[in-house]
Image (cartoon, rainbow, N blue to C red):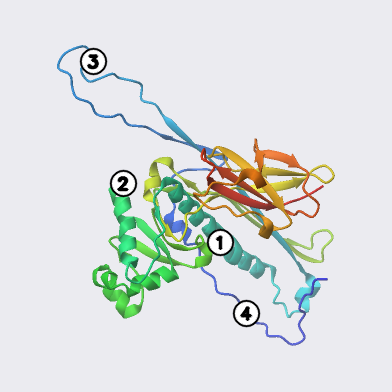
Amino acid sequence: MSMINLASKYSKQVDERFHRESQAMLALSNEHQFTGVQTVKVYSIPIVPMSDYQRSGANRYGSANDLTRNVQELTVKRDRAFTFIIDKGDKLQSEMVSDAGKALSRQIREVCVPEFDTYVFKTLAAAATRHGSYATTAITKTNAYEAFLSGMEYLGNHDVPDTGRVCFCSYKFANFLKQDSAFVRYGDKSQEMLEKGVIGEVDGCKIVKVPSSRLPAGAAFLITHKIAATAPKQLADYKIHDNPPGISGYLVEGRLIYDCFVLNEKADAIYYHGSQPVLKDLIVSTAATAADKSTIIVSSEKEGDKRYYMTAADAAGLTAVAYGEAVDTSGWTAMSGSSVEITPENGHGAVRVVEVDSEGKPIAVGDAVLHIG
């Protein structure tokens, strides 16, 4: 039975937790309009190679072919929700601290915003991993600035604009950076850093410290440019129902539809440095169907060669997968389409789906709770 603390003599001041606003928005473009649609098609036009001019013959400039168009479809998949009840009696007997409006604001800033930032940063890091623009060298106080400059060099060599870059880094990396003598001497804001303990801009790139909980596991830093990705927030709908049927109090509900996409022709504008490469998240859900059966549903677009799934009692019992290490398929079952109905073993309550490339190496993975009929 769940327990709710009712006041005997408590302070009317709520001990609120620390929080911060969205930081991921600094890395995103809003040039693409998703209003009223689920999918946006983005065109890119290829180029043709140069050739020597021929001073005789009919086709002196070379053979001319039609210039094709590449199309990238961006389909918003993330559809998230939350709900909770504040009983009127609980509110009255807790000296009115259980306020529905304040509780909703708390939910947005402590759950919704961190989830969005975490998803964006992981999407960007996974794109850099797939593109090969990442490094895994261990960061120390003597090589932190050099590692940062390597990322900046990568972007520069791929013609990414010098201005407008943003580096999102862990506090641990920031601490190493501030101890690196090369950074202290040559960083654009080095003197301000020494006087005020802040990091400003280095070579025109803003450095933003991010809690490790919002970055991929083992992340040191992520350098990107706003032109590289877009993250539409199609819906942010929050409601407080006063005394809805069956409840004496307040029913709070929220729904968010959002996603994050890296543009194909802008992937070179992302560089990631962490202890390990990052796999893309698969959006996996399950639905209870017939008796003792469950249907696994993968909403993400398929980018790899094949998909496999496995079930276990809980997440701890699922086989881990790592980037670059081929999956031993003996413990997995092939999944031909975007959904499959299964009969899980008795006691199993978790499922993992992995997507692999033509060499059987993982590129994406996702987990879900098994809902069984």
Residue at image position (62%, 44%) is 329
| Label 2 Cα neighbours within 10 Å, binned few <14 / some 14-19 / many ≥20 | few
For disc 2, the marked residue is 158
Residue 280 picture location, percent across and down: 53, 49
Disc 1 to disc 4: CB gap under 8 Å = no
Amino acid carrying mark 1 in the image: Val
Extreme-bottom residue of the structure = 9
Amino acid carrying mark 4 in the image: Asp
Between the C-alphas of marks 1 and 3, the distance is 59 Å
Front one among 183 and 137: 137
Mark positioned earlier in the residue sequence (1 or 2): 1
Amino acid carrying mark 3 in the image: Asn
Extreme-left residue of the structure = 55
Residue 205 seen anywhere in this rendered image of the structure = no
Label 3 sits on a secondary structure element that is loop
For disc 1, the marked residue is 113
Give the position of the N terminus as an image quadrant: bottom right
Between the C-alphas of marks 2 and 4, the distance is 49 Å
Q: Nearer the viewer, mark 3 or mark 4?
A: 3
Mark positioned earlier in the residue sequence (3 or 4): 4
Task: Say whether residue 125 is left or right of residue 37.
Answer: left
Disc 1 to disc 2: CB gap under 8 Å = no
For disc 3, the marked residue is 59
Label 4 sits on a secondary structure element that is loop
Residue at image position (14%, 17%) is 55
Q: What number is the disc on residue 15?
A: 4
Mark positioned earlier in the residue sequence (2 or 4): 4
Q: Nearer the viewer, mark 1 or mark 3?
A: 3
